Amino acid sequence: MTKQSFHDVNVFINGIASVCKDSAIIEEKTLAHFGDEYKRIVRYILMMKFQKFSAKQFAEALVPRDYLDGLYDVERECAKRNGLTVVYGYSDDLMELDGAIRAEGNCFKGGAFHLKRDKGKWKLVDGIGKRNMTNGGDPYCEGFVFEVKDLKI
């Protein structure tokens, strides 16, 4: 399934969820529209919309992922709702932070970064990181998830 499939199912679910909060009914209506071959995607999206996650649980839900996919909209919303940020490599020279904090750092020549709070917003200045991401199924980089409330100001 493609990123577009996830997007289309998510948009459809958002429409139903705007008038119904019962996940069983939402699943039934969505599968009636898209078909049973979308069952895995529908259940994954519903889990992202309705489940509370710790950083560890969220990281486990994302593994294994192709780094080029980044986070799907539903995952980004879930991360924000749960106060989580995902850190992962993107291409051969970027480090991405996505979720509750969005930022990127140039790491073409390696290096370390840290977050700094500036005027109420987190900025990526120069930290360390762990969870495997993939490129076409082959290990590519290690990513990790953290809870923003655990950051020391």
Image (tube, grey):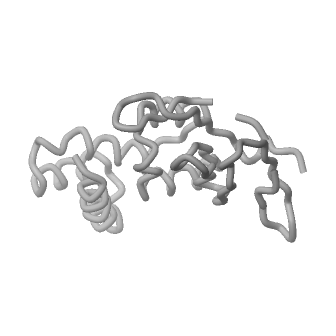
Name the spot of residue 88 as percent of width and height, x first.
Answer: 58, 43
Q: Nearer the viewer, residue 53 or 115?
A: 115
Query: Is 62 above or below relative to 77?
Result: above
**Extreme residue in the front direction:** 109
> Residue at position x 55%, y 38% from top?
53
Q: Nearer the viewer, residue 22 or 13?
A: 13
Q: Tell me what residue is drawn at x 46 percent, y 51 percent.
A: 71
Q: Is residue 35 above or below residue 122?
A: above
Residue 147 in percent (x, y) is at 69, 42
Q: How many marks?
A: 0
3 vs 39, left or right, is right
Left or right, 95 with reference to 151: left
Residue at the outermost bottom position? 119
Image height check: is 38 above or below 139? below
Q: Is residue 111 left or right of residue 94?
A: right
> Considering depth in this image, is 124 or 18 the residue closer to the camera?
124
Q: Residue 69: horizontal and vertical position, in percent?
A: 40, 49
Q: Residue at x 11, y 57 (%)?
A: 33
At x 9%, y 48%, the residue is 35
**Quadrant location of residue 111?**
top right
Quadrant position of residue 129: top right
The extreme right residue here reads: 153
Q: Quadrant of residue 118?
A: bottom right
